[in-house]
Structure formats: structure tokens, C-alpha cells
Image (cartoon, coloured by chain):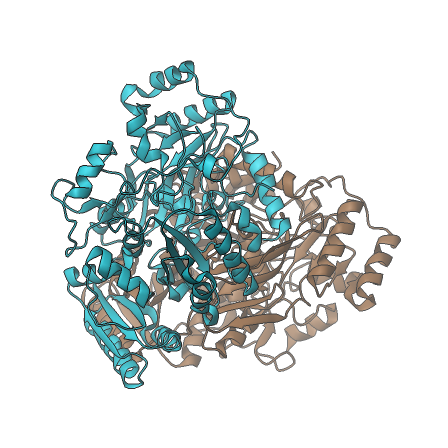
Chain colours: A brown, B cyan
Amino acid sequence: MMIAARCTRLGIPIVKNLTRVSSTSMFKSTDLNQHYIHSSVTCFPKCELTSKRYQIERGQFSTISEEDVNFFTNLLGHHRVINDETELEGYNIDWLGMVRGASSVLLKPKTTEEVSTILAYCNKRKLAVCPQGGNTGLVGGSVPVFDEIIISTALMNKVENVDTWLGVVTCQSGCVLEALDEHVSEYGLMIPLDLGAKGSCHIGGNVSTNAGGLRLLRYGSLHGSVLGVEAVLASGEIVDCLSAMKKDNTGYDLKQLFIGSEGTLGLVTKIAINCPPRPQSVNLAFLGLETFDDVLKTYKDAKKKLGEILSSCEFIDQSSIECVEKNLKLKAPIGAHPFYMLIETSGSNGIHDEEKLNVFLEEALGAGLVTDGTVATEPSRMHHIWSIRERIAEALINDGCTYKLVFIYDISLPLPHFYKMVEDMREHLGSNILRCCGYGHIGDGNLHLNITSKEFEKDLLNLIEPTIFEWTAKVNGSISAEHGVGFKKRNYIHYSKSSGAIALMKQLKALMDPNGILNPYKVLPDN
Amino acid sequence: MMIAARCTRLGIPIVKNLTRVSSTSMFKSTDLNQHYIHSSVTCFPKCELTSKRYQIERGQFSTISEEDVNFFTNLLGHHRVINDETELEGYNIDWLGMVRGASSVLLKPKTTEEVSTILAYCNKRKLAVCPQGGNTGLVGGSVPVFDEIIISTALMNKVENVDTWLGVVTCQSGCVLEALDEHVSEYGLMIPLDLGAKGSCHIGGNVSTNAGGLRLLRYGSLHGSVLGVEAVLASGEIVDCLSAMKKDNTGYDLKQLFIGSEGTLGLVTKIAINCPPRPQSVNLAFLGLETFDDVLKTYKDAKKKLGEILSSCEFIDQSSIECVEKNLKLKAPIGAHPFYMLIETSGSNGIHDEEKLNVFLEEALGAGLVTDGTVATEPSRMHHIWSIRERIAEALINDGCTYKLVFIYDISLPLPHFYKMVEDMREHLGSNILRCCGYGHIGDGNLHLNITSKEFEKDLLNLIEPTIFEWTAKVNGSISAEHGVGFKKRNYIHYSKSSGAIALMKQLKALMDPNGILNPYKVLPDN
């Protein structure tokens, strides 16, 4: 109730920055959509402008004029050109409250043709733009740095077609992930992507970030699942690679350029995505373990014994659970353990799945790998357990202002090094921080390492970075597994990519966006 | 024995153009490697030079000089620079015997650095090159058109690492697919790609073609499975994107540019590929059906009832089976039917899988969708059934010279149009041809439509093309599902891609290979 009131006061549209409410959440509010709650960043003091905090120099772009606003108003109408400062606030700041731009105009096109007209105009006028979906990104990729015009996909939310034979949905890029999943569920299908922000993130943003999420282990990355993309280049030219076929080997696979390039090479307007059959039976085990070595062994066992029904394998450490329990009052279903795992199975035959899961769990318990655990099959219980995992980031940043700031690191590591990084960083940072915890998609080798502190301190940041990236590079990991590099990580990209690769990226950018108007200050390093 | 003798006579290396022998094949030969047989193109009269047959104009490239040969010989040694005309013959002609180049030099580098030196030299000298893996391609992408220097990956066959925790193999691009699969099988893993040419195709060729194969339905495309690529650009620069992490979102996903670009943007030297756990239990059903409508319903039922254990769903028509039975003396395990399906399950629990398969089959038989069928679980029987499917192309081209030529079309279609194309083409071509048959990966909407004729006739080709591509475009299909466009389909690419997309492809080519030396006359259309 309180949070809803805050949102209204600040004029932030209530459909923005939503995360799904756990059935046990104390923050449930009937003022908002029944299933959603605003996980607001607004309980923090207004954060500094990015340009100031990070001392960034503005690019050689034009400044928006009254004439420009008139052009956009003529094209879209008054209600789809937002230039009220208060209304713009929520679009200028990121979900973590760590980066803030100063855009004075937000545009809400409904069609590809409108996007094309907008970009052609901006390109001619050398006006920089920042494409924005649900603004749930964690690396500052979806908010402006200076006064870039925000192009929101919020009104581009039409589903164009569902091929029920092959299992493919074609839609506009502004469809909210969860709504799209609900739509295809009517045909017995599912979107092969699921993540905590599903209630507000847009599928176009997911594609532009190459979001990974909770079930990549089973369904693979968006580079495989996305079958077609329509995108608009900086010039306004529409690139139609919107095949809805499962296989299409006609020339270079251009759509891949738009997957994961965070809106810097083109603005994604439509997507065709492969939809697997929706599982008939889902089980979720929440397990407690004593050592990280047991976690690794349990993961390997799960892969072997659960095989094709394993749909998620997640890891959470004690510190992360403590934070969720304390700050969101979500109670873990088992007592305290140094480590926890969530293991989900999805299959077509409930009896078979249960049998496989039982055999796996009995053997894991018998071998002493797992010391306690519970299995949920009832939707509300599964929902509760998932919310513990999905809301860790929220617990860290949005807990009644106990913490002021959370530094989120999204790292890929070879499994033997996975938790060692958390331990080493904890030791390295000592008493300079409030908390250092780790969780993530262990089945994909993807650690989310979070560090909380009282406020944004440059000294602390210098203590964390680049040490954390050097550590990652030493074991051949990736400094961004699934969140992208956006604004915050762009100057560390060389820890994961060779100078030759970065040079080629820059050439691609220069080719496809010669004036550099598309999401400037993002992805590519300054030098 | 006869075929082996032919090969030896022509001096074609016996490790080239191999397909796995069925245990029932009459062509089994102990002269060759125990498991392989040469499915030679050499029983056909030597085909015309591509440049003559298709009236192609040579690009503005230099001609190889003695000095150039000396440079390569100094770099690689005599035995890795092949310039004997007879020895080169098998590398200049494709597997179908339809396109033939006139290269006078083939190079066999062993390392990325050697490839880099070769390409830097060729780029400086403006010498065109044709990268070649196992030369099993079907669109003329892997053989030269004129005198391009062939760069073979045959000696780049080292496995560098197997990450047994995450299930990832890193290897050189010349590893033979089947050998690589055998290698990772020692760790309980599998390569998520399987196709008829597995005994001779190279993984680098698979990646460069974005090969699909028999299990894409289950494991997805190489755009998702390939985690890392190292490639050498035309300039000789090595692009290292060889991450072996399951997730890596650091900048543009450059490796995707090399997947499916058929060696025209860079030469793939190393690959890291995701390897799923090897299934514990495999079943294969061979079914007979009366109508294509029954095929579609059975496919939909299989997807639903077999769910996560469905690993392949293939379709064969009567004419294709007749050809295999007649020409290869491979007997189908059930009597004559208008249509056949192969449905494979792979899982972690044999009892569960068998139960699911039995329920599915009983219901399909009970509903009259399937009228006859057999299930194989024993490896040699499964092998026999698979060889019927895998050797259809061989039966069509290599059957004691009953047919002189086969036109292979590899089309993606929405399922309701899938077999209508075969029927329409049969009617359209009438008595001008010997056979028009269809088979393919129905689970992926991927039809292989084959047309045989006595000899290469321009009039017949004009009767087939572009009609077949127009038909495909009308139903929003793809004119190349998994074989690529190579030389043969490049000028029809606009049936599946927009002019804007093609223009961007050409810009990418100009950026990455400004002298156009990498596999010229391939992929991109003339105009």
C-alpha cells in the first residue's frame, strides 16, 4: 500500500518496474494490478546524474529543439510524446537507482513504421536516442546517460501470430514477457525464457540483452530460440529478418547482430520465438547443503539422474537467504544451511518425473550430499519458493533502506572456481562493506555476486573493480554472463574479449550506426 | 569393393567423402576403414567446370605463381601443399558431382597461426581462397569455382579441452563430427548435432554451414549450441571469441557472424560447443501411414506425448523408400506405405521412455493414424533403420548410374504446406524427370525435395527454378533450411531475404573481407 502510494505520488506509471508478488509477501497491495507490485527504487535518495557520478563527456549530438518536439507530436500525437519532467523521472533512472539520465522527451511509437520515421529523423538531426523496454536492466543499458531521447516499446505489444504446428509466436517487441507466456500457454506452449523481472520486462529488451534466466539450462540461449527479428537501423531502414521458420540458412544470420547488442546496432521491433510444449508436470525441490563441494556433486548427479526433465538448477548461499528472510519476511522452507539449491523438473508425465526426482533425492540424502530438503508440486508453494530466489536482488536493494546501494556482478565461471570468488571477494573487501553474497544459475556456471554498502563510494568501487574482473579473467570466465555490459561494464569488456574482437565490434558499430546515435555510451569501451 | 577400387584408381584420398556403412549394405568393403565406405561421385561422367556450366566470370584476383607455391611450401612443407592434378580432383568436385572447380593448390595448415599467415599472404597478393572441411556440402559452397586456393582443415583435428562439469568441448575445426562425438562420449557427453555425413564432415564445416541435422528438434541450432569460435579474417587477423562459458554477454556476439556464413567472412579455426549428457536409453520407431494428414497428426501427438524424450521426428515418402530399397538394397522394416515416419526417443530412464513410447504408439495405432510400425532398441537394428533415412541422397545419386543427376532442394515450410510442395512439383515437372520425392525433418518444418534426371539439362533446371523458390516464398518458407546457399542458391536468396537485409550482408562482407578473397562466388547474390 505504501509503495503504491509512493509510485502514484511520483507519477511513475504503475505498469513500470513491476515484479511478481509472492503469495506470502507482506507488500501485497490491492491498489495495483492483482498480481504485481512496484518494487520501487524511489525509497533511496535521488541518485546523482550518471554523467556527474562517472564523469562522462557528452557526445557531439544535437540538442532537442521545440521544432523536434513538434515533429514527434505531429507523428505520434500529444499523448505519445512525454516531456513532463516528473513523469519522465522513472524512465531516466534504472531499477537499481544507480544510474540516472536527464532525458527531456520520451516517445511511444506503436508501429515499426513510426520507429523508422523517428530514427530517420534523429539520424538526420544527429539526435541521440535510448531504446527502452521494461527498464529492468542491471547495467545501466536502458536509461539515458545525458539527454538522449527515450524510445519506449511500451505500446508495441501486439501478438501477430502463433504457429501452433511448429510452436512459434511472432510479436512486437514491447510484449511483457509474462503476458506473452500467458498468451502462448493457451496453445499449450511456453516462452523458453523466465526471469525474475518477467512481470515488467519486454521481450524486445530480453532479446536486446540476450537475457538468460532460470531455464537456459534446459531451453538454451536466445541466440538459438529466437527465430526471427525485425529491427530498425539508425538510418531508419527496416531490416526484416522475421522468419518464423525453425531453420533458415539464407545468407548471414543478421538477426544475431541485434540479439545482445543492447540497442546499439538497431532497435528491435518484432520477434519470432520458438515455443516448446508447456510441461504437464512440474516439481521443485529446495535443498540444504553443508559444503560447496556437495553443491557441485549434487548438480552433477541431478544432470545425470534427472536428465531431460531437469529444467532449472539454482544455487543460493546462506547470506542471500538471510537477506531475503530479514528484509522481505519471506521464510525459507527449511532451516539454516551454508548453501541451498533449487532443482526444478518439468516433464510430460508426472508419475515418471516424481519417480526420477525421488530416486535422485533419496540417493543424494543417502550419500549425505543433501542434509535437508522439501519438494513442492502445488503451484502456490512452488511460487513461494521461486520468489525466494527471484527476489534476492530486491531484498538487497529495497528493504526499507537498510542498505543504500548494491553492486551487482554477473559472472560466468568454470564450476570449480564458482564459490571461491565469493569467498575471496569477502576476504578482500573485509569490513568496507555490509554484505557480500552469491547466488545464481549454477547449471550454467553463472554466479550473481552482490555487494552492499551504505552509499556509493568511489573508494569502495575502486576496491571491487577491476579486481573482480581480473579474478574472472584469470580463470577464463566472462565478466557479464547474462546482464550485458550496458553503461557500467563497458570499459571492462577487454577482460573477456580480445582487442581484435573489440576492434571488430567498433567497426560494426561504425558501419551500422555511423553517427553513433543509438544508445551511446553503452556496450563499447571508450578506448 | 568396386567403389573402393574406383576411388583408388582416381587417386581420391580414401578418407574423403565417407558415409557410414549400414550393417546390411552390399557395398561393405574391408579395403577401407572398417566403418566407412566411399560414397563416390566418380561413377558419373566427370562433370563440367562450374564456370562453364553456369557461365561465371572470374573475379579480379591474382593467379597463383611459382613464388606463391614456394611461400606456402616454406611455411607448411612439401607434404602439406598439394598440387598434383589427380590428387586435387576430389577436392575440386562436390559430393553430388554437380559443381567443379579448377584449383591447382591445396594447403593443409595444422594451426591457427598457419591459417593466419596463409590468409595474410593471400590477402596481400589478392589470391582467392576456398576453405574446405569434409567437402560434404550440397550447395557447392565447399569447392572452388575457378582456381581458388583450397585451404583444407583436414589436419586441424585436435581436441583441446573437455569441461566435464559444464559439458563443453573445445577443439580445432577439422575434427570429424563422428570422431568428436565418440571422443566426448567417453565423458558421458554427446555432440548436439548428427547428420548423414557425420563420418566425414568437419565440425568447422558444420559450424560454417550452420548444419541442422537429425536432432535439431531436441537440441536446437548451432547458433545456440556453439559457445565459442576462433576465426581468422581475410586480413590474417585472428578473432578470438572462443569462450567455453555457457553464457557470455560481453559485447556483440561476433562468433555468430561465422556460424552459417560459409567461410565468406572468416575461416573458422576453433570451436567450443555445448555437449548435453549422452542419453542412457534410445528407442526408434519406424511407422507406416496412409495420408500426409495422418503424418501431421502423429507429429503433433508425438510432441505432446513424448515431450522431453522426443529426439527426432523424420518423414519419408514412398518414392524415397523405393529408391533406397532398389538402389542400395536396404530393405525397409515394414511393407509399402504412402508415407513413413521415424520417431526417436532419447532419455535417462529406459523403463519410463518405453512406457511413454508404448502409450503414444498404442493410441496412434488405435486412432488409425499409424497402420503399421516397428520399434528398434537394439543398436544394429536402429543403425539399419537410420541408414535408410540417412542414405536417401546417396541412393538417389549413387545407384549404379541409373540416374545421372539429382537436384536437391532443402526448404523450410509451414507444416500445412509441407507435402503439397512435392505433389505440386511432381505435377509441374510431369514426364521431364525420373523421380520427384520428399523426405526430411518434419519436426523442424524442413523438407528435402529431390528431383532426379538423366543428365544436367538447362531447360529442366529452368523448369524447376525459380518456380520452387516462388512457391516457397509464397508461403513464407525459407529456400535454404540447413544446407546454406553456397554457390548454387546465392542468386535466389531474395526469395527469403529482403533487399535491405541483403544490402547489409554485402556491407558486412565488404567490411570484413574488403578484397573479397574468402570463398568468392558464394552466399551473396551477384546483384
Q: Is residue B284 visible?
A: yes
Tell me where residue A309 appears, x and y as whole percent.
Answer: 32, 68
Whether B395 is drawn above or below B340: the answer is above
Splitting the image into 4 quarters, where does residue B325 fall? Answer: bottom left
In the image: residue B391, left or right of residue A106: left
In the image: residue A173, left or right of residue B289: right
Q: Give the residue displayed 56% in from the left and 73% down from the top.
A: A179
Please identify the residue farthest to the bottom as the structure is shown. B366
Tell me where residue A203 appears, x and y as whole percent.
Answer: 57, 63
Q: Give the residue displayed 28% in from the left and 42% down from the top.
A: B17
Tell me where residue B222 appears, x and y as whole percent.
Answer: 41, 52
In the image: residue B225, left or right of residue A351: right
Whether B229 is drawn above or below A1: the answer is above
Residue A487 or B47: which is nearer the viewer? B47
Splitting the image into 4 quarters, where does residue B160 fall? Answer: top left
Q: Is residue B153 visible?
A: no
Q: Give the residue displayed 47% in from the left and 66% down from the top.
A: B424
Please identify the residue farthest to the front as the structure is shown. B431
Count numbered badges in the picture.
0
Whether B428 is drawn above or below A449: the answer is below
Q: Quadrant of the C terminus of chain B?
A: top right
Residue A95 or B359: which is nearer the viewer? B359
Please identify the residue farthest to the left as the structure is shown. B30
Residue A130 or B452: which is nearer the viewer? B452
Q: Give the residue displayed 60% in from the left and 49% down from the top.
A: B501
Residue A527 or A287: which is nearer the viewer? A527
Q: Quadrant of the N terminus of chain B?
A: top left
Tell me where residue B132 appears, x and y as whole percent.
Answer: 37, 36
